[in-house]
Amino acid sequence: MILADDEKAMLDGAGGIAKQKAMELLVRYAKALGAERFVDTSNIAGVPGSSTLFLQKYFEEHGGDGSFEAVFSLYDLDAGEVMSVPRANGNCCHLQGGMDLEHFTELGMTPEAMLHQRADEAELARHGVQIMKTCTPYLAGNLPLRGEHCAWMESSAVVYCNSVIGARTNTEGRESTSAAMLTGKIPDWGFHRNEYRHATHLIEVETPVESVMDWGMLGYFIGEAVEESIPVLTGAIRRADPLRHKHCGASAASSGGVEMYHIVGVTPEAATLEMALAGRKPLVTIKYGAAERRRVYETLNANGRDRNIDYVMLGCPHASIDQFRDVADLLDGKKVKTHLWMFTSRAVKTVADISGFTKKIEDAGGIVMTDTCSAIARAVPKGTKVVALDSAKQTHYLPAMVGVEAWFGTTEDCINAALTGRWSGELR
Amino acid sequence: MIVLRGRGIVGGCVEGEALVTHETISGWGGIDPMTGTIIETRHELRGQSFKDKVLVFPGAKGSSGWSNAFHMTRLTKSAPLAMIFNQMTTKIALGAVVTRVPAVTELDQDPLTLIETGDWVRVDGDRGVVEITKAAQKRKSRCDRAAL
């Protein structure tokens, strides 16, 4: 590897032991990738020092305690000792976490775990990390520039960052983002490099894709069709907006490993088809028509049997403020018969609160929560057997993780299920 | 014995029984880090554990929690003995580094076609060499125990 002077200095310990250990980990990682150098980054989204009861107990028995600095040193930086951790470099935020601090009881968490999370948050603040607590940092105040080098975790945020914003990040992990927070470095590999960002697969969309549900299903199709490759889409794709991209990317990163997609005339690195393909011919051309659309819908609903719904979950990825407005309108003056939980970031919830959206949802019997979701917290309301979801990503993960049946449909289908207790969604 | 040569990405030398899958593996949501068991609904290895096995697979997919999930298996003593894979990604590079088990990739022949579950495999992550003894001809250790 070619190391810059500041990188060599950190490795030699000039910035203190924590930066030295962080740099050592990044070098091990970069060499494993086959990267030749690092890029500078000052936009990092990770889960620094985040700990479960398991990790806290483990490190109490193995050379530390359950504190933030112990977990950060021994686990995040994979160092053999507990170190004093300096303030983070640059613009660093904490992504989603394990619980809502107000509604932790509903999520099945103990007061002890809640107090531990509060203590961790005080430590995050002391270390200069923004407590954003969301899988959608781009909707909550962390919006990088086109071309900016980032180090982000969270597959749905990564695909949004590359595809929609045109900023540059690989799918980083907990350890690499924590190390980058101290060093401001990340391996110059993959999506940081121009030659890596071009499409190889062409997807011709022949059936109109306009609703949020349709954008989510298109994403799910893309992931299954291209797996880890980069697709470029042409055809009948309408009403591109942040909400629709959020659902498209999240599902493409769940059914496959899509980290970037192009849509001709829509996304920033695809002004033309030729630009997205770097002038080459696509390796594969794939059609998305009415039959493919139906097959995706059936795959997502394959697990649903019982139409009696116990629980409706909204907000995967975390709900945007326009989704709050829509849900509040649908629920206004009505009462739900099922459990209804809607998840979002603290930033969006603040706006939902003062806009009156939260109150309408709560008056109807729903609960608005922040920080987490059912899959991350592995928590559904007690006794839940059947859930209704408007997210293909959540439908992909939740049934296996908590052992429930799931129905997938539009937000309106889900609200109808909440109001009637019955699933009546169908492909329209 | 079949010998494959590639690039070691995490050092060390171990040998043991292979567990082979032709499907990529999801970390978060795809494995149970407490036991090393594959839990993904439609995965061909669903219900099987890679604990103490030489895991041979195409690569990593899914959530950015991949490294964290495999890092956890090191703590719970449920980690694979070694990793042999084809597709390099940030998920697997970081995951292998923090799981700290010998890992080899970029092999000169496809490990997925040459290695079957149950074969005895020696993984030398320092030199990037994989030696395969088919299950029928299992032989005794050639690893330098002192090097472990």
Image (cartoon, rainbow, N blue to C red):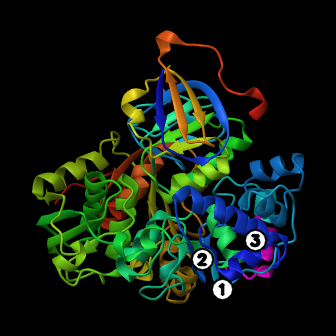
Disc 1 target residue:
A90
Give me the disc on residue A44.
2
- Marks 3 and 2 sit apart, C-alpha to C-alpha, by 20 Å
* Residue A127 picture quarter: bottom right
Q: Which residues are magenta?
A: A117-130
Label 3: chain letter: A
Amino acid carrying label 2: it is Ile
First reached walking from the N terminus: tag 3 or tag 2:
3
Instruction: Give the answer, above or below, for where A304 lies relative to B123.
Output: below
Q: Are marks 1 and 2 in contact (CB under 8 Å)?
A: yes
Does residue A361 show up?
Answer: yes
Q: Is residue A69 magenta?
A: no
- Compared across the picture, whether A69 is left or right of A281 comes to right
Q: Residues within 10 Å of mark 3 (few under 14, many from 20)?
A: many
- Compared across the picture, whether A57 is left or right of A156 comes to right
Residue occupying the point 76% across, 51% down: A55
- Depth check, front residue: A300 or A145: A145
- Depth check, front residue: A405 or A306: A405
To the question of a shared chain for discs 3 and 2, the answer is: yes
First reached walking from the N terminus: tag 1 or tag 2:
2
- Work out which quarter of the rendered image holds the N terminus of chain A and state it: bottom right
Q: Is residue A126 magenta?
A: yes
First reached walking from the N terminus: tag 3 or tag 1:
3
Residue occupying the point 30% across, 42% down: A302
Disc 3 target residue:
A11
Label 1: chain letter: A
SS for dot 2: strand
Residue occupying the point 47% across, 42% down: B85
